[in-house]
Image (cartoon, rainbow, N blue to C red):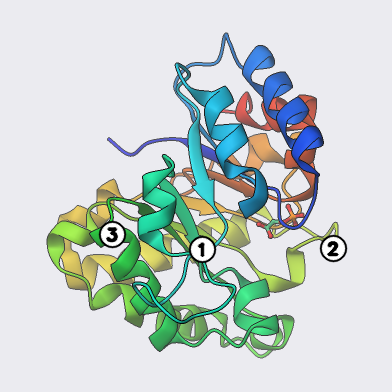
Amino acid sequence: MRRNIVAGNWKMNTTVNEGVKLISEIIEKSKDLSDVKLIVAPPFTHIFSVGEKLKGTNIGLSSQNCASEEKGAYTGEVSAEMLANIGVEYAIIGHSERREYFDESDEVLLKKVKLALANGIVPIFCVGEELFFRESGDHLDYVCAQLDAICELSDDDFEKIIIAYEPIWAIGTGKTATSLQAQEMHAHIRNVLADKFGEKAEKTSILYGGSCKPSNAKEIFAQPDVDGGLIGGAALNADDFIAIAKAF
Ligand code: PGA
């Protein structure tokens, strides 16, 4: 069975104190939640402090990125090994903001995915098209090409990963994909992965991201190939984040 997952991407928001307060509220309010795996991705500076709070809970700890190199003279980078060493279990890789503002290529992203996996970290691999590709009708092909990196993985590694579909035009814009647009893309992603990995693709959790909020999560999560959400803005408010998780 696929796992239902709701992951919060805090992006470059919250100080350490604010982050610790936020996670304390999330822990408190999620006590009666079952059947959904919660994951939080704080900024690097407070992963450790948030991780300390998460001890003894079922909430997963994620980074928002990891380095594409193992170690050494890469000023400013944080390696997968360092993250694993402080209890990080997941890493968001290939977020559209990283691809766009930091020029992360498919080649670099594949290196990050492989290093995360080699260190026991589950990649949450993000794909998604710009508005131009949707309007020209090329969105399915565009996202299919982004999955090439994943198709290079071994069967064993593939089984571990999570995919997030985040249409760029819906991120932080208040404009959400309709549930049918999400379902169309999620089914397409699963088919592309099934061509390479067969029925293993049935077990891959594919999350939707892009202006997901309590008011639209239920309809989106009800789609057969949508297994949860990667939440940005609404993940910074414990009530909204938990309300989204309760939408299953
Ligand atoms: P959003 O961001 O929910 O604020 O649109 C989602 C994301 O970028 O992961």
- Compared across the picture, whether 209 is left or right of 171 comes to left
Q: Quadrant of ligand 1?
A: bottom right
- The residue carrying pointer 3 sits among few (fewer than 14), some (14 to 19) or many (20 or more) residues within 10 Å by Cα, namely many
Q: Identify residue type, mark 1.
A: Glu
Which type of secondary structure does the marked residue at label 1 adopt?
Answer: helix
User: Residue 147: in sight, yes or no?
Assistant: no
Q: Which residue does the image show at 58% across and 10% down from the upper left?
A: 31
- Compared across the picture, whether 69 is left or right of 186 comes to left
Residue 212, position as x, y percentages in the image: 72, 47
Q: Identify residue type, mark 2.
A: Thr
Q: Residue furthest top?
A: 32
Q: Which residue does the image show at 47% across and 85% down from the upper left?
A: 141
- Check disc 1 and report the residue beneath it: 184
Which quarter of the picture shows residue 163? Answer: bottom left
Q: Which mark is residue 173?
A: 2
- Check disc 3 and report the residue beneath it: 117
Circles 1 and 2, Cβ within 8 Å, touching? The answer is: no
Marks 1/2: CA–CA distance? 21 Å
Residue 122, position as x, y percentages in the image: 35, 52
Above or below — where is 112 with respect to 222? below
Q: Is mark 2 within 8 Å of ligand 1?
A: yes
Q: Which residue does the image show at 60% across and 80% down from the upper left?
A: 99
